[in-house]
Image: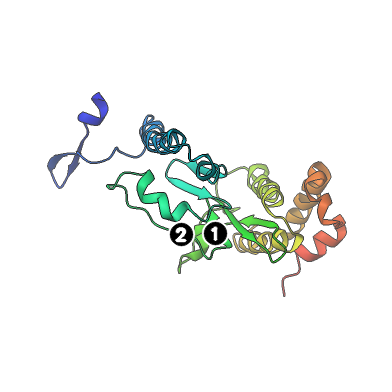
Amino acid sequence: MFLIDNIFVMFGGRVFQQTVGIPMGTNCAPLLADFFLYSYEAHFIQGLLKKNEKKLARCFNFTFRYIDDVLSLNNSRFGDFVDRIYSIEIEIKDTSDTNRSASYLDLHLEIDSEGRLRTKPYNKRDDFNFPIVNFPFICSNIPAALAYGVYIFQMIRYSRACGSYQDFLDRGLLLTRKLLNQGFLLVKLKSSLREFYGRHHNLVDRYGISVSKMTTDMFHMS
């Protein structure tokens, strides 16, 4: 409570006291935000149980939250109750694309026509109308081994997030082109891709694609 009551910022030579919210970047901010929102969620669910509305409470079984990002799956009632769950001071924004697709954290989720959940990476930077520098240039002071390691680590992340080979390939092609434009060598990127496949082939085995096929597809620049 001391931190919340004693937040001051300086701007334009003047000192202001923050009275609404908590500053980003402090160690306690995520935990305080989590407890704050959880208190409303717990109160709502406990209220349903006290009223013996167990069926309604079960609708929220697949509701997840990471700090202030909420995902509710297979729950057509969430929109009807969201204003009853959280405080009126909290601004609620529905960021769903459709009733069958939405982006949550760094994943895009979509339920296909057969009722299966499809996943692929989502990066909000892709929606910006200007280029973002978010990977190293090979001419920087970063050791080359670490720079090429970024390529491997991203392939690991993509393979874990992508349910289909095409989604994995689409994301991998974007990364490959970006790094080539930032001075990475084609031969070393190919070597890094083979190293990824050799060490983590279990992540891509479900695609049923050989390393030679993957290399050909990933470095097809036309």
- Of 81 and 87, which appears nearest the observer? 81
* Numbered disc 1: secondary structure: strand
Mark 2 is surrounded, within 10 Å at the Cα level, by few (under 14), some (14 to 19) or many (20 or more) other residues, namely: few
- Callout 1, which amino acid? Ala
- Judging from the image, what secondary structure is the residue with disc 2 in? loop
The image shows residue 144 at horizontal and vertical percentages of: 65, 46
Direction from residue 18 to residue 197 in the image, left or right: right
Q: Quadrant of residue 137?
A: bottom right
**Circles 2, 1 touching at the beta carbon (< 8 Å):** yes
For mark 2, what is the residue? 95
Dot 2 or dot 1: first in sequence order is 2
- Residue that appears at 79% across and 46% down: 195
Residue 190 appears at what percent x and percent y?
A: 77, 56
Residue at x-position 35% and y-position 50%? 83
In the depicted structure, whether residue 164 falls above or below residue 153: below
Please indicate whether residue 43 sits to the left or right of residue 176 in the image.
left
Q: How many marks?
A: 2
Q: Amino acid at mark 2?
A: Thr
Q: Nearer the viewer, residue 198 or 80?
A: 80
Residue denoted by label 1: 102
In space, the residues marked 2 and 1 are separated at their CA atoms by 7 Å
